[in-house]
Image (tube, rainbow, N blue to C red):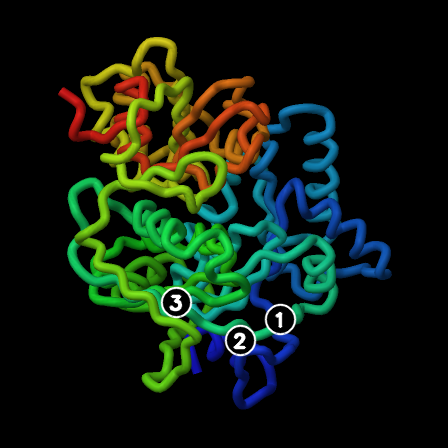
Amino acid sequence: MTITEKILCAHTDLKEVHPGMLINARVDIALGNDITAPIAIDEFRKAGGERVFDKDKVVLLPDHFAPNKDISAAEQCKMMKEFAIEQNLTHYYEVGECGIEHALLPEQGIVLPGDVVIGADSHTCTYGALGAFATGSGSTDLAAAMLSGEAWFKVPESIKIVFSGKPNQWVSGKDLILYLIGMIGVDGALYKALEFTGETVKDLTMADRLTICNMAIEAGAKNGIFAPDETTTEYVKGRAKKPYQFHQSDTDAVYVKVIEIDVSKIEPQVSFPHLPSNARGISQVGNIKIDQAVIGSCTNGRIEDLRAAAAILKNRKVAPYVRLIIIPATPEIYRTAMQEGLFDIFLDAKAVISTPTCGPCLGGYMGILADGERCVSTTNRNFIGRMGHTGSEVYLASPVIAAASAVLGRIGGPGELK
């Protein structure tokens, strides 16, 4: 079996599973946020639910429209908070301790290798970086999991991605996943498990792996996953508060496809509107003027991302008439960036620093675009109207490209800066 199949199997009473099987699996974490949890809570009530299956395994947090952006957001967050109090949930995070969910849960050791995680948010697939099976679900499935502790799945076929070679300067995990999505398309891995392997993987940081798995859904995948290794061990050993298990694919595991990618041939990538698959190398971008740059999100709001951006912005200024918004993904990241002096660099560059929030990524707030405005962003989607007006444009890129572009006033790379 593949690693995905093994983890799913371990959460059933079956001896083996294979692609196409419909199974019920026990979940280790059932996750909801301020947009999706209220719907799940309603369905939980309608089904006659009184107590969640395990107060340690249901995780609720306000990160999309919080701190509350308007009355509707406030009502959503209030409903979720009251449910968390009623159920005495261990893992409810109020503003001040809350961060962007897919950055906070790994950081706090809530998700661990070998776990099965469902979240009513499509980017739940992020946790595959730790060697967990993690996937997005609807709010109704979240309600069912909150009640029963189980979720149903069709076991996905697996695609093996083999990364080889040494990445070029400025090339990060964001560039690898944008390149892959550009290669196979937004439906290229539809309901498949994307398993990331190859000699390059051992040198990928956990931050890079989290970014890559985060955008597996942008290729249509059911989940993305890395087999745990020394990097995983180093990351989880000081965070884990419960037992965890490393799984590896069998040598004779069956894959529906194997895709080999020489990363030494990849340059920094930019995805043009209005699909993540519209990726091209930075040398092919041309002259695209921007109004805004955003560095943050569950894709690229980690401390490594902020350090990379700060290295570009140090002793430089954001171009006239361009907005640069920096969004640390968690309070811990926020504090670390502040202590390391990164905030001074950002403020000197004329950037604005936000509290941890999903904010502009989904057109929530803290950076909505007007008609005709263009933004280069480290977020994960650039669909029509994703960040505001349907006449606006979003270009996806890594933190170093976003930072360099903010200085240049147009999309460009660090190599163009003087």
Neighbor class of circle 3 (other Cα within 10 Å; few <14, some 14-19, many 20+) is: many
The residue beneath circle 1 is 153
Question: Helix, strand, or loop for circle 3?
Answer: strand
Establish if 2 lies above or below 387.
below
Question: Helix, strand, or loop for circle 1?
Answer: strand
Left or right, 103 with reference to 196: right
Which residue is found at the position 34% from the left and 38% from the top? 270
Of callouts 1 and 3, the N-terminal one = 1
Q: CA distance from mark 1 to mark 3?
A: 18 Å
**Residue 142: horizontal and vertical position, in percent?**
68, 58
Viewer-nearest of discs 3 and 2: 3
The numbered mark at residue 195 is 3
Q: Is residue 301 visible?
A: no
Left or right, 417 with reference to 297: left
Asked if disc 2 and disc 1 are in contact, CB closer than 8 Å, the reply is yes
Establish if 304 lies above or below 417.
below
Asked if disc 1 and disc 3 are in contact, CB closer than 8 Å, the reply is no
Amino acid carrying label 2: it is Leu
Can you tell which quarter of the image residue 93 is in?
top right
Q: CA distance from mark 2 to mark 1?
A: 9 Å
Can you tell which quarter of the image residue 199 is in?
bottom left
Neighbor class of circle 2 (other Cα within 10 Å; few <14, some 14-19, many 20+) is: many
**Residue 293: horizontal and vertical position, in percent?**
39, 25
